[in-house]
Amino acid sequence: MVYGMYFGAPGLPELMIIAVIVLLLFGKRLPSVMRSLGQSVTEFRRGVQHTEDDDDDSRDRDDSDRKSHDDHRSSISS
């Protein structure tokens, strides 16, 4: 029977080791790094929201164009 290495989600001890390493590497720069990361995430969400709004607007325009086109066709055929 072959036993492979199992890599699961990191537990509390592993997360604490990672936190210590991050603190040692970034130290005084950590607040500015986190601030930049937060701004990046916020800007990304705004971009996604803007894209979703544009998609909704174009879908609404397509629906209204189809409706006016169908209304026009039904009035011609009557």
Image: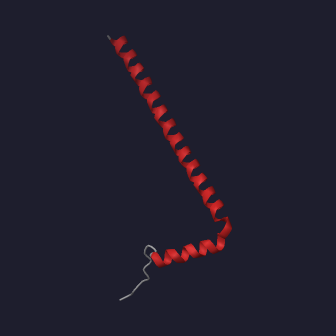
41 sits to left or right of 5: right
List x then y, in percent, for residue 56. 46, 35
Q: Is residue 6 left or right of residue 38?
A: left
The x, y position of residue 54, in whole percent, is 51, 36
| Residue visible at 62% across and 57% down in the picture | 35
Q: Quadrant of the C terminus?
A: top left
Q: Quadrant of residue 6?
A: bottom left
**Vertical placement of residue 20 versus 48, above or below:** below
Which residue occupies 58% across, 55% down? 38
Q: Quadrant of residue 70?
A: top left
Q: Horizontal and vertical percent for residue 4?
A: 42, 83
Q: Quadrant of the N terminus?
A: bottom left
User: Which residue ends up furthest to the right in the rendered image?
Assistant: 28
Query: Residue lying furthest bottom in this view?
Result: 1
For the image, the number of numbered tags is: 0
Most foreground residue, 78 or 48: 48
Question: By what rule are the colours in the image chosen?
Answer: secondary structure
Does 11 appear above or below 48? Answer: below
Residue 64's place in the image compared with 12, above or below, is: above
Residue at 56% of width from left, 49% of height from top?
42
In the image, 25 versus 75, the foreground residue is 25
**Between 76 and 5, which is closer to the camera in this rendering?**
5
Q: Is residue 53 above or below residue 35?
A: above
* Residue 64 coordinates in the image, percent (x, y): 43, 24
Q: Hey, which residue is sitting farthest left in the picture?
A: 78
Observer-nearest of 73 and 23 = 23
